[in-house]
Image (cartoon, grey):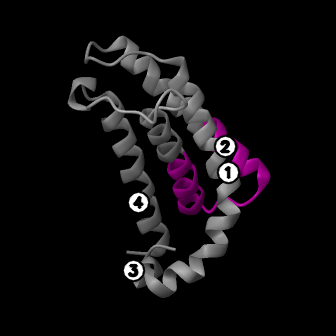
Amino acid sequence: MSQSRIAVVLASVWTLLIFVLCLISASRFRAFSFGTIISIDKLVHFTMYAGFFVLWSFALGFKTKRELYKLMVVGIAFGVLIEVLQWAMAMGRSYELDDIIANTIGSFLGLYLLPLVRRMIPLLKKYLPFLNKVY
């Protein structure tokens, strides 16, 4: 399997993971937080959407600002779609504007972390040789 195919598979699996985790019943998760500042739920949203952005930018080979901004729009739209599905489906989940905001911030975080991740790839490949097959 070529590097680009593996990268697309990895990004697709990550996207599917977001989709499934955001649509299964909320009762399956225990509520916990870091006090009143920010809940762990929002940190999970930041992480999921930053990962979404970084993985898809590698999988699609996006490098130009225009391509990255298009990916940003896709990431934000995906987050909104998930929230609308949570609202529309009776699965114990609910629409939260805070989640859309957290998803959006996560996508922006991915955009700003992308140059750092690109610089770290050679170091990561040195210590995690399986990455040579992906990127």
Q: Quadrant of residue 119?
A: bottom right
- Check if residue 9 falls in the magenta segment: no
Residue 10, which numbered label?
4
Q: CA distance from mark 4 to mark 2?
A: 20 Å
Instruction: Classify mark 2: helix, strand or loop.
Output: helix
Residue at position x 47%, y 82% from top? 132
Q: CA distance from mark 1 to mark 4?
A: 18 Å
Span colored in magenta: 50-74
Q: Residue furthest right?
A: 65
Give the residue at mark 1: 111
Counting residues from the start of the chain, the first of labels 3 and 2 encountered is 2
Give the residue at mark 3: 130
Residue at position x 62%, y 51% from top? 110
Q: Residue furthest left?
A: 28
State yes or no: discs 1 and 4 in contact (Cβ < 8 Å): no
Counting residues from the start of the chain, the first of labels 4 and 2 encountered is 4
Q: Quadrant of residue 41?
A: top left
Instruction: Give the amino acid at mark 1.
Output: Leu
Can you say which quadrant of the picture contains the N terminus? bottom left
State yes or no: discs 2 and 1 in contact (Cβ < 8 Å): yes
Residue 108, which numbered label?
2
Instruction: Give the amino acid at mark 4.
Output: Leu
